[in-house]
Image (cartoon, rainbow, N blue to C red):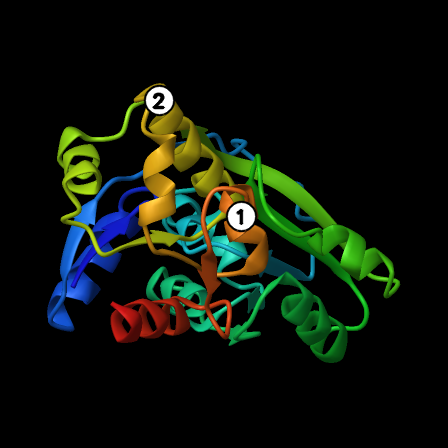
Amino acid sequence: MRLLVTRPQPECRKTAERIRALGGEAVEAPMLETRACAPLRFVLAAVTGLAVTSRRVAGILKEHPQISILRALPVFAVGDRTAAAMTSAGFEKVVSADGDVLALAGLIAARQPEGHLLYPCARDRSGDLEGDLAARGLRCDPVIIYEANPVEQMPAVALDGLRDGDIDGVLIYSRRSAEAFLSALENADSAGLLKKIRTFAISPQAGEPLADYTCVETAAHPTEDALLKLALNSC
């Protein structure tokens, strides 16, 4: 089976390597380009923990001037891979919600019902962690540390593979990636290809922009393991 991976680099390459290790083929076609934009200093005086919903946060914080202070804080990660990335970046007190943003809010409420969390995040993100926590009486301040911008043109190898029927399925990891994927197809006058392409999304929200164009199959759990299991067992 040959799968098209649409997530940004370097995650796109890592996912492609996982697919190849599992016996499949992968075509890398990141639909978003990311740029770090973290502030030089975080206001940390009252912060009692970090909320993290992306592995990308680990690499950015690792290079931050306040990293020694940040590493002393407990980390609440949305999933196991995000937790592993934070641990690899030197954070020692890391727990995983092993789920989505709602699961993370529940974990934080159970583990740290009092305090003030810093939420280093993307400019555009899915879910409303700060709102979910506010409803539970908890404070969570989002601070933008990176942004992801859509790629206007799909790589030629990916577009040719889709047109020739050489790609068995497309992996969608976020709503914005799905929107960028659709836009790139429209720019190439190839949106009609979606009717012929099996599309696998990590969550209903991620796949929603494509729902009017194709039947989107959704992973049983919002994790990469569940998404790859779905795609590799289906193709």
Q: Foreground residue, 28 or 144?
A: 28
Q: Secondary structure at mark 1?
A: loop
Residue 60 found in image quarter: top left
- Which callout, 1 or 2, points to the residue nearer the camera? 1
| Kind of residue at badge 1 | Ala
Residue under label 1: 211
Q: CA distance from mark 1 to mark 2?
A: 21 Å
Q: Residue 188: horizontal and vertical position, in percent?
A: 30, 22
Question: Does residue 65 sit above or below 39 in this rendering?
Answer: below
122 sits to left or right of 163? right
Residue under label 2: 152
Q: Foreground residue, 203 or 41?
A: 203
Q: Foreground residue, 209 or 27?
A: 209
Give the residue at x 16% y 60%. 17
Residue 181 found in image quarter: top left
Q: Considering the image in quadrants, where does the N terminus appear?
A: bottom left
Q: Foreground residue, 12 or 97?
A: 12
Q: Residue 108: horizontal and vertical position, in percent?
A: 70, 71
116 sits to left or right of 2? right
19 sits to left or right of 5? left
Residue 122 found in image quarter: top right
Mark closest to the chain's N terminus, 1 or 2: 2
Q: Residue 204: horizontal and vertical position, in percent?
A: 57, 58
Give the residue at x 59% y 53%. 205
Q: Considering the image in quadrants, where does the C terminus appear?
A: bottom left
| Kind of residue at badge 2 | Glu
Circle 2 packing at 10 Å, graded few (<14), some (14-19), many (20+), is some
State whether residue 46 appears in this view. no
Question: Does residue 182 sit above or below 103 in this rendering?
Answer: above
Q: Secondary structure at mark 2?
A: loop
